[in-house]
Image (cartoon, rainbow, N blue to C red):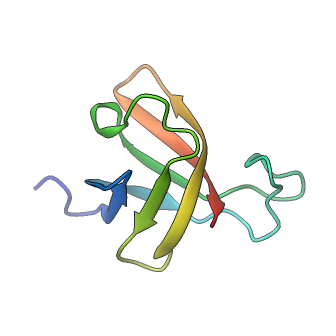
Amino acid sequence: KAGEFAESATLDGQTVHGLVDPGFNDASLDGWGGGGSSPRFTLPSSQVPANAEGKTLVITSGAAAGTYRVANAMPDATGLTTLHLLID
């Protein structure tokens, strides 16, 4: 069943579902992390708006629930996009 293992979130006000990788707490401000890594949210590319950078992602369930800002969006050519996040 679609979404069974995914976290619920809103991206730029639209409901989305994806997988969360919380990263490490010492991520750098550019979203790439020098000593650690930034939180990431992977979702179907079809759910990602154009120019996603700077948009707000609110994860509404799970251990990583909170408000984030998209630092960058990295499509992987398989239909998925990973959003690198900054804690807002």
Q: In which quarter of the image is residue 53?
A: top right
- Spot the residue most to the left: 1
Q: In which quarter of the image is residue 29?
A: bottom right
x, y percentage for residue 54?
58, 45
Does 28 sit left or right of 56 as displayed? right
x, y percentage for residue 59?
41, 68
Residue at the spot x=89%, y=51% of the render? 34
x, y percentage for residue 41?
48, 52
Does 69 sit left or right of 32 as displayed? left
Tell me the quarter of the image containing the N terminus.
bottom left
Q: How many labels does the image show?
A: 0
- Spot the residue most to the right: 35
Tell me the quarter of the image containing the C terminus.
bottom right
Q: Name the foreground residue: 16 vs 36.
A: 16
- Spot the residue most to the top: 77
x, y percentage for residue 6?
30, 61
Residue at the spot x=81%, y=52% of the render? 33
Residue at the spot x=58%, y=55% of the render? 69
Q: In this view, does 44 lie above or below 24?
A: above
Does 47 sit left or right of 24 as displayed? left
Does 4 sit left or right of 40 as displayed? left
